[in-house]
Amino acid sequence: MNIETVAVIGAGVMGSGIAAQVANAGKKVLLLDRVPEGASNKNILAESAIEKLLKVKPAALMHKRNAKKIQPGNLEDNLADLAEADWIIEVIIERLDLKQALYKKIEAVRKPNCIVSSNTSTLPLADLTAGLSAEFNDHFVITHFFNPPRYMRLLEIVEGPTTNPEALDTLIQFCDFALGKGIVKCNDTPGFIANRIGAYWMQTALLEAFRLGLSVEEADAISGRPMGIPKTGVFGLMDLVGIDIMPHVLKSMVHSLPKTDAFHQQAKIPELVTKMIEDGYTGRKGKGGFYRINKAHGTKVKESINLATGEYAGSQKPALASLQGPVVKDLKKLLSFDDKGGQFAWSVLAKTLCYSASLVPEIGDDINAIDRAMKLGYNWTYGPFELIDKIGVDWFIAKLKADNYPIPPLLMTAAEKTFYRYDNQQHQCLSLNGDYQTISREKGVLLLSDIKQNQTPIERNASASLWGIGDGVLCLEFHSKMNAIDPNILQMIATAIKSIPGQCKGLVLYNEADNYSVGANVGLALFAANVAAWPQIEAMVKSGQDTYLALKHAPFPVVGAPSGMALGGGCESLLHCDAIQAHAESYIGLVEVGVGLIPAWGGCKELLTRWTNNPRRAKGPMPAISKAFELISTATVSTSATEAKDYLFLSATDGITMNRERLLFDAKNKVLALAEAYTPPEPVELSLPGATARTALNLAVDSFVKSGKATNYDGVIADQLAIVLSGAETDMAERHTEQDILALERTAFIHLLKKEPTLDRLQHMLESGKPLRN
Amino acid sequence: MKNVVIAAYSRSPQTFAFKGALAGVRPDDLAAQVVAGLIKKINLDPKHLEDLIMGCAFPEGEQGFNIARLVGLMAGLPQSVGGVTVNRFCGSSMQAIHMAAGAIQMNAGEAFICAGVESMSRIPMGGFNPMPSPELFKTLPSAYIGMGETAENVAKQYNLSREQQDQFALVSQQKANAAQQAGLFDDEIIAITTANGVVTQDGCIRANTTSEGLAELQPAFLSDGTVTAASSSPLTDGASATLVCTEEFASQHGLQALARIKSIAISGCAPETMGLGPILASKKALQRAQLSMEDIDIVEINEAFASQSLACIQDLNIAIERVNLDGGAIALGHPLGATGARITGKAAALLVREKKQFALATQCIGGGQGIATILEAI
């Protein structure tokens, strides 16, 4: 069976978010909700949910047109339509009686083999399905999504004692391939895995911050990055998810967990927090939370609450000794450091890691699955057992003993070992009996991180490496800071171009950082400009152009496989590939104008060529130029890979992979497919209209400058871009080679780099990470 | 001289470009439905027609290939009826009426359909391939000046405040809304069949406009300017058509003529204040009709912008209560090529409805021109 049509019942934030992700996968979704009392429009709840989906930030839909895939309806008129659904997801409020009543209605109409799941986070599966038919029960599971469903990669699945294995497999395949989720099978225990540990961690950090007298900023600085946790830290996270959620979660956990569970000790809400909730300080959705933005005096000032007094004051950069470089960068040092920051770190981490260890095998007997759940569900860099490995099992046990902590049995099993190891090229993790089990990847999952554990790179320098990924395909990995493109990366591309022909079939540009590449290394450009090293700058630009052009015309196929941001020079690398296999969450754009420059590694040329060759564009000399001009001059960045197709950063035939872990495999397959009878692309020639196009583009820019939508200097940059895209001093009857346009890019780039406002933009970007509007 | 009359007037509903109900309709389809609707309404055998003259400001893409001829064929006119496309930007379809009047005086035909169309959704203002002369742009940059900036120039020159312009826009919305509510457009609108149903009502009118709401808007064209989106006409889709013929032709075919064309005029002006175009054009037309402004009972002035409308009204000393009785382009929209026939047809129809004697229809034109027509009751 395939899942083609999905029904989501419950159009709240989670239900509509899940519906959006199903629509993002290209499938039809029926979104139903109840009819509110006295409503004249019976579909009002589902319809307004879809309207909200179109506005919510970050966007739930990967493309606005995906909203059309969601059919709104109501439970009075559209119940019979559920018969079409291959999968029905119930996402209504957490009340057993209402859920059971709904299931009875579903049971009456669902087609045989239709899978039904609940997104419950608190109710046991056995209670949910009591009194329903065996056929229904066999096709019922819990599918627990995380908010927001598009972006949070974890999906916890709980199966019942009689769940049909084929149905479960169909569902898992769909959620993995189509929805892009990382599936973790869980036991039917309260909070499953991620929220059981995650809620415990949040509560522990909250209470310890109060107990040890840390400020909100201090607690977040310690509980965030040093522990491999997103920099929002614990208070920032609570502001994000809603502070008022916590009492509900605690109530449900306290209700369902045995009195002996350590969770009870952390299930307290400080008085200040109760008062905050009562006063509407529920986080970002309310008047503010532990942080707030004070706009009272015409400016936006970030403020934090004082946990002792409840008063807000301007947020301060924390100055604890434990947050200084050598300590904060070494987790073991931080955990042993004798100030309140170190004490906080140790107390939170010791309790959380011990609690996690104590939950095995109750919540699951696979420690790798538990680590995976925390990484995918809470964006932790390391799962709890990976963290223990990082600080050392024996070091941890010794410190626990010294501080009179009880040692969980699992930790003793791991004594003198590690939770993970590589043995004979096999990645293994510890099982409960002390043996190691090999961690097997799903078919179609290929991770560079696995390859890197077992191989040495074919070539390596400070910024890039070349890896063999099997079947004669190489992978070029960027690993400079933020994957900024620098001479080392260019040199590695040149190396690949030299070494592949005759030896290998093709190349994938891919890495496993959060962002494929944030662009060229602007620090180098700024430095060179400040010392007026113009010949060197020109050579650097030319070298980038030559390298990318050689990549484009290399006698083997090259596939770009971005995930996250692919900006500026990173985007230009993709534009020179034969094909792209993009992760669905790819944010692609030519953003050079933000630093006062224009794309000069062939980006203008390639985007112009793509629009010129686009069969759907309006005919004539201007539309392609206008479109490339618009995209580059406004630094447009796609909000998804799907949207990148609108801008032709991706072509219609480029592939999109929903599941991040399947990206490299898909990209490699694309190389292999292209490698059969591969011929490199022919050099491009374009006819460009010259000064008339520059005049037309400048007329448009002029109106933006005059209306205040662009600055005068934006106009200066746009004029240089107009010169490049119009072909400068030419005429329609002339033909431009790729080299001609590249020469125009170089001239415009150097021209702008010599201007003070461009240097100011570069400086500002390096210092703040944000573009300067000057 | 013969008596040339406007014997009939119809138009499509006018809706916002891109988001309105007509955005998905090809302009040739839209215009053909209006032309066919007009002929059906007056029950005229189209074999008597000499020509279909159609105004269009950006005659390319779906408005290309001599759209007038194609609309004639689509509307079921006999092949013997000609078709010519006219471009005088916003004045295009008033120019179509002028051309028919001229041809009639030359004995070059007795009856003409004078129509106009613009789908601003489907053909961008400026066209798909704007390719200005770099030389002219160097010597006279205002030749290509944006329309919004000209509106700001006029506002400065006539010292028109933001409040005055907003007030003018508000009144236009109120008049249009009242007219729509009273069904005063029902006679002139030809329902348009689209893939998503039949469109019968104007879509640009903002019934809930308030002066507070208008005051909140940011300037649209100059960061320190006074012209906003609300005091400008919106991008619009629409089509219009009139029957222009001799008075004899009308009576022979049982048509109740709406108005006689008394005089016509064109005048050029500075491109950077193109909104003042109606002033000289109207003065010329008045002189040719041997009338003064006090004689004019009904004025249809195209509201490209509130500022230029106010400047012209002030300069020509027009009594405000005689202006745009059912609202103007700020509320109804301004499908460039269609507006001229709409306001001239409207002025003729208003002479009948209001039982008045003289009417003036006038417009400004991008690039620096004005066009005017004076009508007289039958």
Image (spheres, helix red, strand yellow):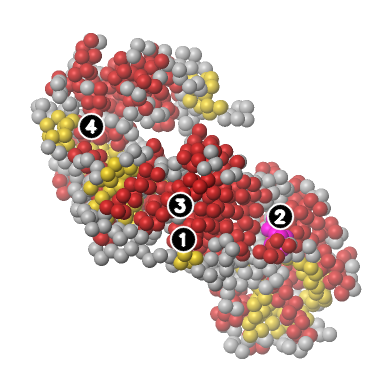
Residue A730, can we see it?
Answer: yes
Residue B120 position (above or below residue A361):
below
Q: Earlier in the sequence, mark 1 or mark 4?
A: 4
Q: Which residue is mark 3?
A: A542
Evaluate if marks 1 and 4 touch, with contact meaning CB atoms under 8 Å apart: no
Distance CA(mark 3)–CA(mark 2) = 42 Å
Q: Quadrant of residue B345?
A: bottom right
Q: Viewer-nearest of labels 4 and 2?
A: 2
Q: Position of residue A644 (x, y in %)?
A: 42, 53
Q: Position of residue A434 (x, y in %)?
A: 10, 26
Specify the segment rendered in magenta: B141-148
**Residue placed most toward the observer, B227 or A763:** A763
Amino acid, disc 1: Gln
Amino acid, disc 3: Lys
Q: Viewer-nearest of labels 1 and 4?
A: 1
Q: Which residue is mark 4?
A: A370
Q: Residue at x 79, y 77 (%)?
A: B260
Amino acid, disc 4: Ile
- Res. A739 mark: 1
Distance CA(mark 4)–CA(mark 3) = 49 Å
The N terminus of chain A - image quarter: bottom left
Within 10 Å of the Cα at label 3, are there few (<14), some (14-19), or many (20+) other Cα atoms? Answer: some
Residue B324, can we see it?
Answer: no
